[in-house]
Image: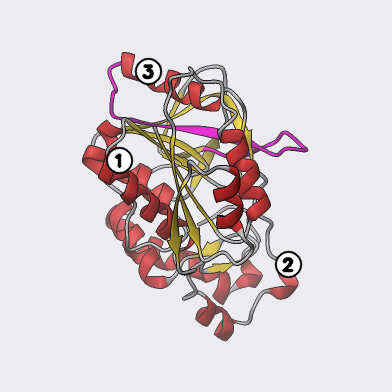
Amino acid sequence: MAVLLTCHNRKDKTLRSLDSLFSQDLAPDFSLVVYLVDDGSTDGTSEAIAKTYPQVKILQGDGNLFWNGGMRKAFAAALEVSHDYYVWLNDDTILYPHSLSTLLNTHQDVKDRGQPRSIIAGSTQDEDTQEWTYGGYRQLGWWYPPFKCSPVKPTDSPQECDLMCGNIVLIPQEVTAVVGNLDPALTHYAGDWDYGLRAKQKGCSVWITPGYLGTCARNPKPDPANTPNVKQGLKNIERPKGLALQSVTLQPWEEWKILMQRHGGILWPIFWILPYRKLLFPQFFDGNRDA
């Protein structure tokens, strides 16, 4: 099994995540190969990992890869070797001891149902409040924007969904054989959601496991007082992480266009423009879900 991570200047969080990974309840002969991209960290991340976990394969980035680029680099290195399974793990996610075995057991369960080409995602919860934070989603319908969706919260059995967050995800070789790597046209945001939807377009399925597999705090929302004016906001959208508003993250124009063309059906031009109304006319929109 290959485990893929990318990080940037979060040494303590990254080490804590790796500690939870290497503390998994697995058979003694189970093999983990960890590919970690350090995207230009200046806080000693690589040195600390090499000292504590010398078995980790550390790949260097220049600080401009961000999540999608870093994970794509790690994925590419793992795909060259060829593994039975590939696991995405965010470096701010702390796994419960049963997480990897639950991913594998769920995949086998789904496979026994006749769906071998299945992506299995895990749900995370807030460490303090125990509330759901990341996991799987279901789309609301073809007449809604493709990323307008509702969370699928874990129960005591696997549940099928449409797309998944990249915090804890198991991708078997049968899926990588038809979907391949993350899309190089994307920089940071939505590469994980895009991967799940592309997989479904190719006849694969996306599931979440029973129960929670770890903890991860939700990213904080920006302070409304720091919302830029329209002119500055339109400029900031072109940054790799786009522009984070209270109720939506606005993707760089061209990246969002690619996503809507790919997943938005005949209504894609409308879905492409729709989110930017929240920057141009913020006084009319105060919802808390992405467009």
Task: Give the CA separation, mark 3 to mark 2.
Answer: 44 Å
Mark 3 or mark 1, which has the lower sequence index? 3
**The residue stretch that appears in magenta:** 113-135
* Secondary structure category for the residue under label 3: helix
Q: Residue 151 occupies which quadrant of the picture?
A: top right
- The residue most toward the top is 112
Q: Looking at the image, which is closer to me, 155 or 9?
A: 9
Mark identifier at residue 199: 1
C-alpha separation, residue under disc 3 versus residue under disc 1 = 18 Å
10 Å crowding of disc 1: few (<14), some (14-19), many (20+):
many
Percent of width and height locating residue 284: 62, 68
Outermost residue, bottom side: 231
Viewer-closest of 75 and 128: 75
Q: Are marks 3 and 2 in contact (CB under 8 Å)?
A: no
The correct choice, above or below, for 122 with respect to 217 in the image is: above
Please tell me whether mark 2 sits on a helix, a strand or a loop.
loop
The quadrant where residue 196 appears: top left
Q: Amino acid at mark 3?
A: Gln
Percent x, y of residue 184: 32, 60
For the point 43% across and 19% down, the residue is: 29
Q: Please tell me whether residue 128 belongs to the stretch shown in magenta.
A: yes
Q: Which residue is mark 2?
A: 223
Please say which color scheme the image uses. Answer: secondary structure
Image disc number at residue 108: 3
Report the front residue among 175 and 259: 175
Marks 2/1: CA–CA distance: 36 Å
Q: What label does residue 249 carry, if any?
A: none
Q: Is residue 178 above or below residue 143?
A: above
Q: Amino acid at mark 1?
A: Ala
- Kind of residue indicated by mark 2: Asp
- Say whether disc 3 or disc 2 marks the residue closer to the N-terminus: 3
Image coordinates for residue 28, horizontal then vertical, percent: 48, 18
